[in-house]
Image: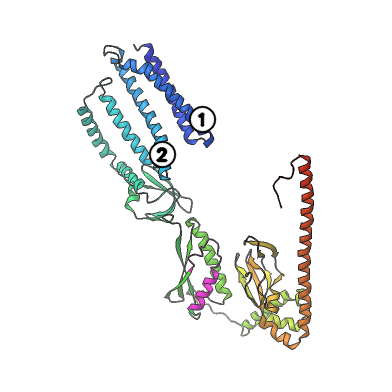
Amino acid sequence: MLDIDLWTGLVLAPGLGLALTALLWRLRRGRQGRRTIYAIWLAVLAVVAALLVQRLALPLMLRPPAEPRATLSWKLAEAVWRMLAFHAGLQMVDLLIWEGILVRLSDRPVPRLLINVFNVLALLVAALAIAHSPTVFNLPLNTLLVSSTVVSAVVGLALQDVLRSMVAGIVLQIESPMSLGDWVSVGGHEGRVMQMNWRTVTLRTRENRHVVLTNGKVSAEDIINFSQPMSLQGVDCFIGVAYPHPPEQVKAVLEAALVDAPGLRQVPPPRIFTVSYDDFAITYRIRFWIADYGALREVQDAVMTRVWYALKRAGMTIPFPIRDVNLRAVPEDAAEREAEARRARVLRTLRPLPFLAPLDDAQLAQVAAGARLQHFAASECLMREGEAGDSLFVLCAGEAEVQVTGTDGKPVTVALRRAGDFLGEMSLLTGAPRSATVRCSSEVEAAIVDKAAFRNILLADPRIAERLSENLAAREMEQADRVAEAGARLQVQRRVRDEILGRIRSFFAMGEGGADIG
């Protein structure tokens, strides 16, 4: 029979072990303010455990062999006691050294796999030491080593694939070719690293599929890391343009299409290369740079969309092979009819504009004949603040934001233009620089009227210039009045705000030391 002290120790040991485990768990995951409290409780329980060992365990261990500790029950109890104590010590080392000192020294966490390997090896050594201890089982060391060698050989043969993956996982943790959250390509699979454990690496693809690869397979494959050592990555897209268009002109159009494209890094700048002369087109490589590889598909979509609109506006064709032969009767005047329909649409757009009221129908028709319809993608700029210009934009469809540079240097949206609105009249008639940036908030179709369309009309009838200048002056005065009205309204708002603020300070006896909200 075990004495009362041993029974007391066996009852208290699990309780203390559970309490220490709970405190260690809370200490790892608790908020910064509570971690000090958990650390104090952990120290108190450690002292209690030390006193318990001194009061119960040491006297039992020092008894002569004839005492109850020589029985099998006592030996098992003492072995369990020592293993639990050693495990608690490993947890303290884990918390204080692995997750504490080493993290602060290296500024990066120690791979969990290495910590687990260390803990397993330490527990195996502790188990051998306890089995060899004279006060426990007192087994010969050579017997233990031979037995462990045989067991290791059997287990190694049975689990050689698993062990190979485990060793490969340790090597991956040491070499660290990838980390959690990195975008990588391994064995034909591309995705974000979601998990790395003893045996496998888990990737999440762009289609939100989880691909589980064994560490052995990962270590045998070439690993492409798109996030390390730097996240800046070059991306190539290819586009074919018809042969009649000169390559230098095509390159200029493509480079202009990529300015301010969302997701693209402008440093280093995008580059356009002539790649090959194919059967139906000249192929160009569009090389640009991105910092977020996870947004690759979205950026490619934005680039290719902008390229289509830019080429269409420039009158450049993206050819494609045609295998079917279709015979159809095309009227001889089909092109003329199409041009006439386009002029009629532009004329319908220009006629309601008050800015062009001084022009009669014939003059409006002449302006419409010289105008051109262009399409713009969302986020493209119709004009940029400060740039020179000599054209008028009339929106036929879509919406665009008018932006000016604020006091902090950032663009501020001041107006929204819709179908039927016009922009750039001062640049058209006076050559003044653009006073604002106009950016498309959706796909936009615009009629563009340039200086050449007005030149002959103004030279033929100079009085039109006077009437146009009157309309422009009236428009400028209206805008100035709106700005002045907004400024006066802001002054009144500030005055009322200051009065209310003074009453609040007086009511709460705050004095004049409050923060200025001007």
Quarter of the image containing the N terminus? top left
Q: How many marks?
A: 2
Per the image, the residue denoted by label 2 is: 101
Question: Pointer 2: residues within 10 angstroms few (<14), some, or many (20+)?
Answer: few
Question: Pointer 1: residues within 10 angstroms few (<14), some, or many (20+)?
Answer: few
Q: Amino acid at mark 1?
A: Ile
Name the residue: 42% across, 42% down. Answer: 103
Task: Identify which residue, 196 or 280, lies in the foreground.
Answer: 196
Task: Identify which residue, 80 or 323, lies in the foreground.
Answer: 80
Residue 73 seen anywhere in this rendered image of the structure = no
Q: Amino acid at mark 2?
A: Ile
Secondary element at tag 1: helix
Outermost residue on the bottom side: it is 460
Residue 312 pos. (x, y %)? 57, 74
User: Quick check: 329 above or below 483?
Assistant: below
User: Does residue 251 belong to the magenta stretch?
Assistant: yes
Secondary element at tag 2: helix
User: Does residue 19 belong to the magenta stretch?
Assistant: no
Per the image, the residue denoted by label 1 is: 37
Residue 245 pos. (x, y %)? 51, 79
- Colour treatment of the image: rainbow
Q: Quadrant of residue 383 in the image?
A: bottom right
Mark 1–mark 2 distance (CA, rounded to whole Å): 20 Å
296 left or right, relative to 333: left
Residue 158 seen anywhere in this rendered image of the structure = yes
Magenta residues, start to end: 247-270
User: Quick check: 58 above or below 84?
Assistant: above
Q: Earlier in the sequence, mark 1 or mark 2?
A: 1
Residue 296 pos. (x, y %)? 49, 59
Name the residue: 37% across, 32% down. Answer: 90
